[in-house]
Image: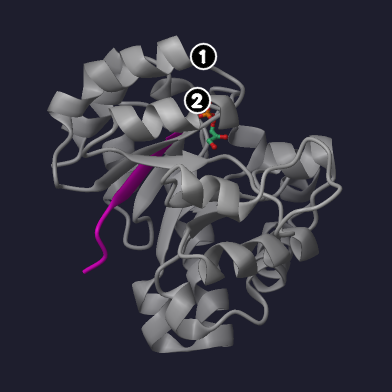
Amino acid sequence: MRKPIIFGNWKMNKTNAQAQVFFDGVEAFVTDKADFGVAVPFTALATSVNAASKMNVAAENVHWAPNGAYTGEVSVEMLKEIGVKWVVLGHSERRQYFNETDADINKKAVVTIENGITPIVCVGETLDEFEAGNTESVVRTQVSGCLTGLNGEDVKNIVIAYEPVWAIGTGKSATVEIAQNTCALVRDEVRNIFGNDVADAVRIQYGGSVKPDNIEEYMSQEDIDGALIGGASLEVDSFKAIIDAIK
Ligand code: 13P
């Protein structure tokens, strides 16, 4: 059985003070029905790690180099020092606005795993790719490109988030059928590369306009093990409602 995994992604939202208010509000309601967590901006990481007890805390990005002349970037060691155990890699907003490629994400995945930080690797097609019927080839290419060269035992423990770009922040969520079918082909690609044991163990999230009132439907699907949630993870009340929806 794969344990459900529900993470928020705050994106470029929340100061330290606001992060503290969030954790003060949700911690008491966190259950053991899932691994719950939230990805927070770099500046709020230390506060969030200190404020979280049952919640998990992720960074939203990391650089692959151990240190050096990369102005504005943050290394894995810096995350480790403050107790960060998770990182979101290759979010579509990083791919779209900061030109991140599958090869970049792969390098980041390698160093995070080597350092005991668990990556949540994001994949997903754009609206043009969706409308052209290219979802399958795009997503398979992203999965193989991001995970190439990793050790199968390590891949069992990572998380892959399928987030169709056209469903992010648009209020236009993918139908449950589309989400299930694409998560199934993500798993199938993992099966092709790493075999049955790894494919059966790896946890796959759906993300894109997930809300308290639609999360149960997604979670009832065979290949959807969790959700990556933007807008609905920002408020204490909506995050509490998400926690309550995971029975
Ligand atoms: P929304 O839930 O706001 O659509 O964002 C999804 C997302 O990008 C999570 O990483």
Q: Residues within 10 Å of mark 1 (few under 14, many from 20)?
A: some
Per the image, the residue denoted by label 1 is 15
Between residues 57 and 78, which one lies in front from this camera angle? 78
Name the residue beneath numbered marker 2.
44
Percent of width and height locating residue 229: 45, 33
* Of 185 and 18, the residue lying toward us: 18
Residue 243, horizontal then vertical, whole percent? 22, 32
Identify the disc placed on residue 91: none
* Residue 202 sits in quarter: bottom left
Q: Secondary structure at mark 1?
A: loop
Question: What residue span does the magenta drawing correspond to?
Answer: 1-8
Asked if the residue at tag 1 contacts the one at tag 2, i.e. Cβ–Cβ closer than 8 Å, the answer is yes
Would residue 247 appear left or right of 135 to someone viewing this image? left
Q: CA distance from mark 2 to mark 1?
A: 6 Å
Q: Quadrant of residue 147?
A: bottom right
Callout 2: 10 Å neighbours few (<14), some, many (20+)?
some
